[in-house]
Amino acid sequence: MSKKEILSLIQQYSTIIIHRHVRPDPDAYGSQGGLGEMIKQSFPDKKVLLAGEEDSSLTFLNTLDHIDDDTYDDALVIVCDTANEARVCDQRYTKGKALVKIDHHPNLDPYGDVMWVDTEASSTSEMIYELFLAGKEEGFQLNEKAARLIYAGIVGDTGRFLFPSTTEKTFRYASELVAYEFDRPELYRHLYNTEHHIAHLKGYILQNFSVSKSGLSTVKITKTIMDQYGIQPDETSQLVGVLGDIEGIVTWAFFIEEEDLIRVRLRSKGPVINDIAAKYNGGGHPLASGASVSNWEEVEPIIEDLETVCKQYQLEQNK
């Protein structure tokens, strides 16, 4: 059983370094930090370090550590919420004595000495709480800080429990986590606080979206538009869900122009889109994925592929 193997490795190693993916979201921070706090609380004598680059929009959740290269020599490395090796933030993750992968995305890129991948989980943070439950009899403990981080990750990846990935188990775990004393209103304020320039761009998107007959909506955010609204490329991730409540849209795509590529963010209410994402240097969940292409010309084939799956989905729905 992977959970038992992971718990055993955590008990064996005195130094544990935890990684997550680039361009982190609340689940990346929540699973990484929640696991770290759980281990610190359970084994105060262990050295537990969190690797990666800080994201200024998520430092309210947790801060990361500076790690010297030689710290990896005798360390257990755990990578959370990262399906593909290329997306691990801080590529020194291979330098440890042993490597563990904990993730809830489709396992298209297996790596690590031990892998625990559960695509039925709402989030990797949910899996971290499940790991705690599996280790309670062996002395694993959870504190308020760990509970706050894990809860934040679950809330972030379930869209406040609205996404189909939310299960009875998700609600049960959430109800147990809120029994810990952390400030939920304050956490929600940080998670969903919208700055003025982002709200203005949201207005631009809502005024300018269109929907094809198949139910596909696409949004192109160029450097010119971002400069106009004072937006950084990573801030656009806060707006990907804005089209999700609009009638008639079944799939939507955001194309964001960065310095050397076009970032693609895909969302769906039914058509499976992660196969398309994988075709264009990406991947993810069946209904929430990401990809990247080199220029605007390469965007058109993605739109064509999305139109195809949307039309097929509509045909199946109308049978």
Image: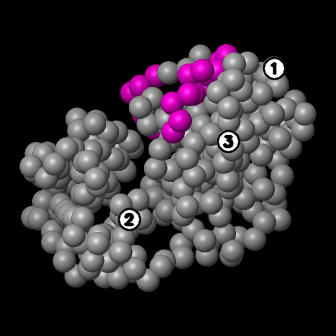
The Cα atoms of the two marked residues, 3 and 2, are separated by 25 Å
Magenta segment, which residues?
89-110
Q: Is residue 80 magenta?
A: no
Q: Is residue 167 visible?
A: no
Q: Which residue is mark 1?
A: 12
The quarter of the displayed image where residue 281 is located: top left
- Label 2 SS: loop
Residues at discs 3 and 2 in contact (Cβ within 8 Å)? no
Q: Which residue is mark 3?
A: 66
Instruction: Indicate the position of residue 82 as horizontal and vertical percent values.
Output: 49, 37
The quarter of the displayed image where residue 62 is located: bottom right
Closest to the observer: 294 or 250?
Answer: 294
Earlier sequence position, callout 1 versus callout 3: 1
Q: Which mark is residue 27?
A: none
Q: Which residue is mark 2?
A: 232
Residue at the image point whose x is 44% and y is 37% from the top:
87
Looking at the rendered image, the disc whose residue lies closer to the viewer, 1 or 3, is: 3
Q: Is residue 96 magenta?
A: yes
Q: For mark 1, does the 10 Å Cα neighbourhood hold few (<14), some (14 to 19), or many (20 or more) residues?
A: few
